Amino acid sequence: MSSRPVILAGQTTLGQLMGLLKQIDLLITNDSGTMHLAAALDVPQLAIFGSTSEVATGPLNQNAAVVKHQMECNPCFLRECPTDFRCMKEITVKEVVDVARKILDKAKIRGRR
C-alpha cells in the first residue's frame, strides 16, 4: 500500500461503502456482504475462504480471485473451528500478496488503474 489504511468498519452507510469500493484498486476480503457488493460493482477483489464454500457463496465477477486451501473438513460453514482452523492458518501472507499483485497487474493492463 502506498498510504496508511483507514479503518471504517461500522462507520459508513451502504451508499458510502459503495462509493468507497468504486475508488479502490483491489479489495482483499473474506466471504462477506462487502465481497458480494464489490462483485456487483465489478471491483477487483481477492476473497479468502476457509470454512465456507467459494462455489456456493463465492464472488460472482470476472475480476475476482479466490484463495482457499481445500481440507478434508471444509466447507463446514462453522463460525468457530472445533479443531485447529488449518483451512485459514495454511494460507500465507506471501500467497495472498502474490495473487493480489497478479490482479493489480491484470487491472493495469486492462486500463482500470
Image (cartoon, rainbow, N blue to C red):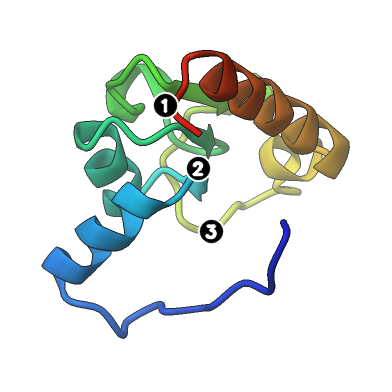
Residue 57 % position (x, y): 30, 29
**Residue 85 higher or lower than 12, as above or below:** above
Distance from disc 2 to disc 3, alpha carbons, whole Å, reads 31 Å
> Which quarter of the figure has residue 2?
bottom right
Which element carries disc 1, helix, strand or loop? Answer: loop
Q: Report the residue that reaches farthest toward the front.
A: 111
Q: Position of residue 51 (x, y in %)?
A: 52, 38
Q: From the viewer's perspective, is 50 left or right of 90? A: left
Left or right of residue 62, residue 33 in this image: left
Q: Mark 2 points at which residue?
A: 25
List the single residue furthest toward the left. 15
Question: Which residue is the site of mark 3?
Answer: 80
Residue under label 1, please give it.
Answer: 53
Position of the N terminus by quadrant? bottom right
Three-letter residue code for mark 3: Glu
Q: What residue type is labelled 1?
A: Ser
> Within 10 angstroms of label 1, few (less than 14), some, or many (20 or more) residues?
some
Is residue 91 shown to the viewer in this render?
no
Q: Residue 87 location in percent, x, y?
A: 68, 36
